[in-house]
Image (spheres, rainbow, N blue to C red):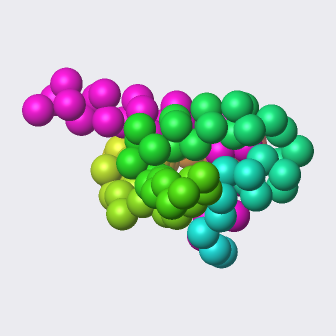
């Protein structure tokens, strides 16, 4: 189970690491689009767009359907709950560390003030 979750997070973050792929998700959040339409919007070749869509599809963020010669893309059903939980755990860790650092800084300021008097 741990290996699956790790691979799942790796695929998600790899897919989201590219600005074009994030843009594709934003575009598909507004409306379904063909690969051709996406390629034109992002000013890239069909081959390049197919690769980007393939990465998003493997991560579960996008689904495609081919009707005739047109491949239509839409947002997938997968949510970002696991990714958000992973990020939240690290946010809590860093918050705790910064809280401890604040305590150390305040103690040093207090000692400096006492020593200065």
Residue under the image location 11 percent in, 32 percent down: 1
Query: Residue 94 at x, y = what percent?
Result: 47, 41
Q: How many marks?
A: 0
Q: Main secondary structure of the magenta part?
A: helix
Query: Position of 60 compared to 22: left or right?
Result: left
Q: Is residue 79 visible?
A: no
Q: Is residue 30 shown above or below 108?
A: below
Front-most of 111 and 106? 106
Q: What segment is highlighted magenta in the picture?
A: 1-29
Q: Tell which residue pokes out farthest to the top in this image.
A: 3
Query: Residue 73 at x, y = what percent?
Result: 55, 58
When asked about the image quadrant of residue 84, the answer is bottom left
Query: Residue 72 at x, y = what percent?
Result: 57, 60
Front-most of 113 and 38? 38
Q: Is residue 54 shown above or below 23?
A: above
Residue under the image location 65 percent in, 44 percent down: 21
Residue under the image location 46 percent in, 44 percent down: 57
Q: Tell which residue pokes out farthest to the front in this image.
A: 68
Query: Position of 99 compared to 108: left or right?
Result: left
Q: Is residue 77 shown above or below 51?
A: below
**In magenta segment, residue 74:** no
């Amino acid at each position: 189970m741990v290996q699956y979750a790790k691979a799942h997070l790796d695929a998600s973050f790899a897919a989201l690491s590219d600005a074009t792929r994030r843009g594709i998700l934003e575009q598909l959040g507004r409306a379904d689009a063909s690969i051709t339409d996406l390629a034109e919007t992002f000013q890239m070749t069909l081959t390049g767009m197919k690769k980007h869509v393939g990465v998003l599809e493997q991560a579960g963020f996008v689904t495609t359907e081919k009707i005739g010669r047109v491949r239509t893309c839409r947002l997938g059903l997968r949510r970002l709950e696991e990714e958000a939980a992973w990020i939240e755990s690290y946010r809590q860790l860093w918050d705790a560390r910064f809280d401890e650092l604040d305590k150390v800084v305040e103690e040093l300021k207090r000692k400096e003030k006492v020593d200065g008097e």
